Amino acid sequence: MARPFLSAIFSLVSTVVLVAQTASLALGPTYPSQNGPVAIITADFNADGKPDLAVGNVSSGTVSILLGKGDGTFNAPVVYSLTPGCEVNFLYAADFNQDGKIDLFGNCFSVAPAFFVLPGRGDGTFAAPITTPLPTSALVGFEELTGQMAIGDFNGDGKLDLAAVLFDPTTGNVNATLEQASGYVFLGRGDGTFKTGVPLALGTEHPLLITSADVKADGITDLVLSTARNTGTTNADGTPIYAGAVLVLFGDGKANFGLGPEFAFSISLH
């Protein structure tokens, strides 16, 4: 569930603001949104060659679609409701059901955590969401922190897969400690759903953020994570000191990932 102070802020932030890029930045038009527009992505949802917008509204459990006119302005938003209680904070646009049309992927970190896909019809409209439930104890990502998922074809079957950081609040307070964080790979079925997640072998590291790239330039997708490990020492106020790192996992093209180089640094979390 969203943190109380952030929910209060999100209830006030209910517009999408466009900024024009010219010789200097100028304020563009604003568009109404629902409560908590914390995720936004651009894609061509109706195949007219003009960029459109999708906005995930964390406090409303909805996604708003604004079709672009190609002149820097957008049509009025069309709102799609998600599973009741879904608090969406991540969006990704791609073809998840292999019909050649752009879909929307997102996550729900709520009392009913899940991944969802809104299947695109190719005309700027979307069908009802398809969901992949997660364990009831799972929180997708570090609450409102985005960037905790990576999309790609990890096993070379032409279907989009997902790497994600999940938190289990039953093993601790997600706002105070990182010991409940783990990384998982979810293989896509090509129909908008995903198979059960397989844990990533990270040793003693606990992941925060994750992304994908071919870092070895061998044509195989790898994963890069930011991680933290409790050093067992504390600050003067008793809060733990963590050893942070950027960790590379090398892919083998079969959805298996092995430990690569690690670039360490120290961090203190308060």
Image (cartoon, helix red, strand yellow):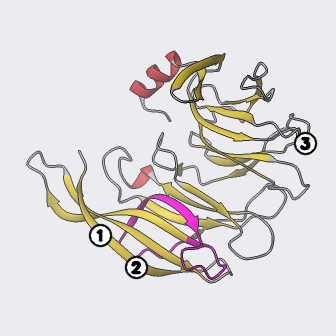
Dot 1 or dot 3: first in sequence order is 3
> Which residue is rendered at x = 81% and y = 26% of the image?
69
Q: In the picture provided, is 170 more to the left or to the right than 45?
A: left
Dot 3 or dot 2: first in sequence order is 3
Q: Amino acid at mark 2?
A: Pro
Judge whether 151 appears above or below 65 on screen: below
Mark 3 lies on residue: 122
Task: State yes or no: residue 205 in magenta.
Answer: yes
Q: Amino acid at mark 1?
A: Ala
Q: Which is nearer the eye, 142 or 244?
A: 244
Mark 2 lies on residue: 261
> Which residue is rendered at x = 83% and y = 62% of the image?
190
* Relative image position of residue 43 (x, y in whole percent): 75, 42
Q: Which is nearer the eye, 203 or 113?
A: 203
Instruction: Report the number of numbered marks.
Output: 3
How packed is label 1: few (under 14 Cα within 10 Å), some, or many (20 or more)? Answer: some
Which residues, given as a range, are shown in magenta?
199-222
> Which residue is rendered at x = 82% and y = 48% of the image?
102
Q: CA distance from mark 1 to mark 3?
A: 45 Å
* Relative image position of residue 77 (x, y in whole percent): 75, 22
Is the residue under label 2 in contact with that under label 3 (CB below 8 Å)?
no
Which type of secondary structure does the marked residue at label 2 adopt? Answer: strand
Q: In the picture provided, is 93 more to the left or to the right than 98?
A: left
Q: Amino acid at mark 3?
A: Gly
Q: CA distance from mark 2 to mark 1?
A: 10 Å
> Which residue is rendered at x = 57% and y = 55% of the image?
149
Mark 1 lies on residue: 264
Which type of secondary structure does the marked residue at label 3 adopt? Answer: loop
